[in-house]
Image: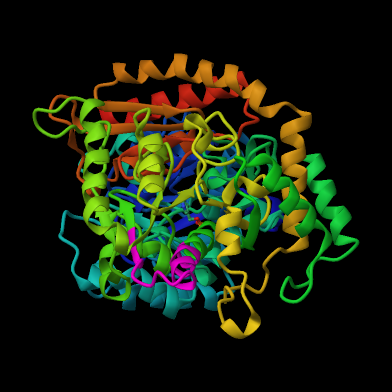
């Protein structure tokens, strides 16, 4: 047809591996999802033998083109077109299809052309469906049925299309009936992807009712941008990146089976409080890129600090040498943390900062000759990271159970959940009982306890559980009284998140050891610091021969680029009066949050500064949680993403933790979209 690349980039051909695999349903799903993304979609079914497919698509996708353009060739009998046309004396001319195709193309952003049957279906004895695809110069999306036998049909189709020199944009599997998925159904997509060497664009689940709403709910995983393929053709490698992501990456805390079915968002740039993906879509960063970003993305001062440092040196070791930014940052950290924390030991992330703190506390007593002080106390529901040492002091069963045999024994102190009070108890009164419990443990066991490790004021990963006022202070006092070291893990709470620079400041607590990471570099580079008191430091100062050195150190410890970023981050706090400006924004946030209680399935809304948890419950009265299989939190976050706000849940808790630089207007956007997303997912289902 000689239509050139422009036409090719604006349309796709949908074929089946056979008749009755659900091509029309999938065409409708793809069309509906594209429309949801704001794309003006046209549809075409050039050849149809019996049935209502073209009319169905026209009506349900709400397109106004004439049925003659959408379906230029129609025969009454359900037969192969070559036969049906012959029996009805229909004289087929491909030019009629081309003309209609051009008209539709001009009217729409994107056109979906649906075949009839498979690619070798004869339209005339000498003109097969695949000839039409070639003439239209289209890439192909193959619809395959899930189940036994599909691999053979699908691979044959792929080979045929490729053999014709055409491109397969991917395969969509369709659940044609409500079946419980066996091994074949679960493994079909992987097998086709691997053997057929084509992308799998998703699985359309069995749809009870074929409506826009049902599709939006159940088909979000279809890789729509790969179907569009616009950016790839115009030089933007978005689709290729998404494919390579699935081919080469293993994502953290992610069930990759799900991921491989989804359309991943690939972040390409950041601007202030927004993230921009490889398709150019902008998202408000509602969780500050997993609780790290402080002053916004692409901040000119932090950028410049790193650039300046790159021109000097990017890395040199702290083992046996020192470097300029590492020294300057250590001095600065000692200045800004509660007085009494005097030395800085660097590492790369929150887990190592905690791991180091535990090893230090343990060895401190060993060095001091109190060799029985080896036990470690931590709190129920605590989270301190994913390395084995930090997992050992974690209290979230889901993350820890599988490693039970690998991790060391600890004493877990029951800790109050501010939302779910034990029977007959009232919050916050019962919360203070944990101090009594702690004292009981200390009374009998303090000779064998090395330290208490805790997340001060907010237990983040547990779902933003906020401590009642006074409990932290009480714990710190008990630690002093019984000579047990206090480790405050400020990895999440540090650098302004709770409204003060460090959460310990709320209760004027000075721990023996403080762990910092996440926000330390403004969310730019991996860096952590374990800060200790002079007393702890002195506990390691001995003669070389005594072998009481702290034998620990990571290769990139004190990395100059990361330290330069951290120095710039801390300077911005001072120069921009970040904490001062934050207070009115915290207030604004707390004025907005109560409205979430209007929603039928919001049980609790918790806030400390810029750390917010909105807990979804199945029943507000009994506080019964939604079963985790329902993925309520995930679904709410997906709905928010569709509205341009990036969130990530903790189970049934929707977390809001924006950068400190977020504006009041952006807070309103964050709140508004989150509210609508919760309402849409929990109430409109
Ligand atoms: N401690 C706390 C309190 C945390 O919230 C986290 C991470 N969410 C960690 C430690 C672990 O930090 P990282 O992921 O950098 O290892």
Q: Give the range drawn in magenta.
A: 358-376
Residue ID at (49%, 41%): 34
Left/right of residue 601 with respect to residue 277 in the rendered view: left
Left/right of residue 156 with respect to residue 250 in the rendered view: left
| Image spot of residue 431 (x, y percent) | 25, 33
Q: Quadrant of residue 109?
A: top right
Position of the C terminus, as image quadrant, is: top left
Residue ID at (50%, 54%): 264
| Image spot of residue 658 (x, y percent) | 55, 34
Q: In which quarter of the image is residue 626?
A: top left
Position of the N terminus, as image quadrant, is: bottom right
Q: Vertically, is 337 above or below 145?
A: above
Q: Which colour scheme is used?
A: rainbow
Q: Vertically, is 106 above or below 391?
A: above
| Image spot of residue 14 (x, y percent) | 44, 56
Query: Outermost residue, bottom direction?
Result: 545
Left/right of residue 627 with respect to residue 457 in the rendered view: left
| Image spot of residue 138 (x, y percent) | 57, 59
Depth check: 104 or 602 in front?
Answer: 602
Depth check: 552 or 312 in front?
Answer: 552
Instruction: Tell me if I can see residue 604 in this picture.
Output: yes
Depth check: 426 or 531 in front?
Answer: 531
Residue ID at (40%, 24%): 675
Instruction: Tell me if I can see residue 69 in this picture.
Output: no
Residue ID at (52%, 16%): 587
Q: Is residue 351 magenta?
A: no
Query: Outermost residue, left direction?
Result: 424
How many numbered marks appear?
0
Q: Is residue 359 magenta?
A: yes
């Amino acid at each position: 047809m000689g239509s050139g690349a422009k036409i090719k980039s604006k349309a796709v051909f949908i074929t089946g591996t056979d008749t009755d695999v659900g091509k029309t349903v999938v065409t409708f799903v793809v069309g509906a999802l594209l429309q949801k993304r704001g794309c003006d979609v046209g549809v075409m079914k050039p050849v149809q033998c019996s049935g209502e497919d073209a009319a169905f698509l026209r009506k349900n996708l709400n397109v106004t083109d004439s049925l003659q353009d959408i379906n230029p060739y129609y025969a009454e009998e359900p037969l192969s077109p070559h036969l049906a046309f012959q029996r009805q004396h229909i004289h087929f001319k491909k030019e009629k299809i081309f003309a209609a195709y051009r008209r539709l193309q001009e009217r729409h952003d994107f056109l979906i052309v649906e075949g009839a049957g498979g690619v070798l279906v004869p339209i005339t004895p000498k003109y097969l469906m695949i000839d039409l695809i070639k003439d239209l110069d289209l890439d192909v999306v193959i619809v395959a049925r899930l189940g036994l036998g599909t691999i053979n049909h699908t691979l044959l189709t792929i080979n045929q299309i490729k053999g014709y020199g055409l491109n397969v944009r991917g395969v969509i599997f369709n659940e044609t009936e409500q079946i419980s998925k066996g091994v074949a159904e679960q493994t079909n997509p992987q097998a086709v992807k691997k053997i057929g060497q084509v992308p799998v664009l998703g699985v359309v689940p069995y749809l009870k009712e074929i409506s826009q709403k049902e599709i939006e709910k159940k088909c979000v995983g279809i890789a729509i941008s790969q179907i569009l393929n616009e950016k790839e053709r115009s030089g933007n490698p978005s689709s290729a990146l998404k494919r390579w992501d699935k081919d080469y990456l293993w994502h953290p805390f992610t069930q990759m089976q799900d991921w491989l079915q989804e359309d991943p968002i690939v972040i390409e740039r950041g601007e202030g409080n927004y993230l921009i993906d490889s398709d150019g879509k902008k998202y408000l960063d509602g969780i500050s890129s997993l609780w790290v970003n402080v002053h916004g993305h692409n901040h000119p001062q932090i950028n410049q600090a790193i650039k300046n440092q790159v021109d000097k040196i990017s890395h040199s070791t702290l083992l046996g040498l020192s470097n300029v930014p590492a020294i300057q940052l250590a001095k600065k950290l000692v200045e800004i943390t509660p007085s009494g924390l005097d030395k800085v030991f660097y590492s790369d992330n929150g887990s190592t900062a905690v791991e180091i703190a535990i090893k230090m506390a343990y060895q401190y007593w060993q060095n001091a000759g109190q060799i029985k002080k080896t036990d470690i106390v931590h709190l129920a529901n605590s989270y301190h990271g994913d390395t084995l040492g930090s997992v050992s002091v974690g209290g979230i069963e889901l993350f820890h159970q599988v490693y039970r045999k690998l991790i060391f024994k600890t004493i877990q102190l029951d800790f109050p959940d501010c939302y779910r009070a034990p029977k007959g108890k009232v919050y916050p009164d019962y919360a203070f009982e944990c101090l009594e419990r702690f004292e009981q443990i200390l009374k009998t066991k303090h000779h064998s306890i090395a330290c208490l490790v805790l997340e001060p004021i907010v237990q983040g990963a547990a779902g933003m559980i906020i401590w009642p006022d006074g409990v932290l202070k009480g714990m710190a006092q008990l630690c002093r009284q019984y000579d047990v070291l206090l480790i405050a893990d400020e990895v999440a709470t540090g650098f302004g998140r709770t409204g003060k620079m460090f959460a310990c400041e709320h209760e004027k607590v000075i721990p023996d050891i403080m762990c910092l990471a996440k926000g330390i570099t403004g969310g730019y580079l991996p860096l952590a610091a374990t800060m200790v008191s002079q007393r702890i430091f002195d506990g390691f100062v001995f003669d070389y021969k005594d072998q009481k050195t702290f034998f620990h150190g990571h290769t990139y410890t004190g990395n100059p680029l990361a330290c330069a970023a951290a120095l710039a981050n801390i300077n911005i706090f001072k120069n921009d009066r970040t904490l001062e400006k934050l207070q009115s924004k915290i207030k604004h946030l707390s004025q907005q949050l109560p409205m979430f209680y209007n929603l039928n399935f919001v049980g609790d809304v918790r806030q400390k500064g810029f750390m917010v948890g909105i807990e979804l419950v199945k029943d507000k009265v009994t506080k019964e949680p939604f079963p985790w299989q329902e993925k309520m939190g995930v679904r709410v976050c997906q709905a928010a993403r569709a509205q341009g706000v990036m969130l990530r849940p903790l189970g049934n808790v929707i977390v809001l933790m924006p950068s400190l630089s977020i504006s009041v207007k952006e807070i309103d956007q964050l709140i508004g979209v989150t509210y609508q997303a919760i309402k849409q997912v929990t109430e409109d289902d």
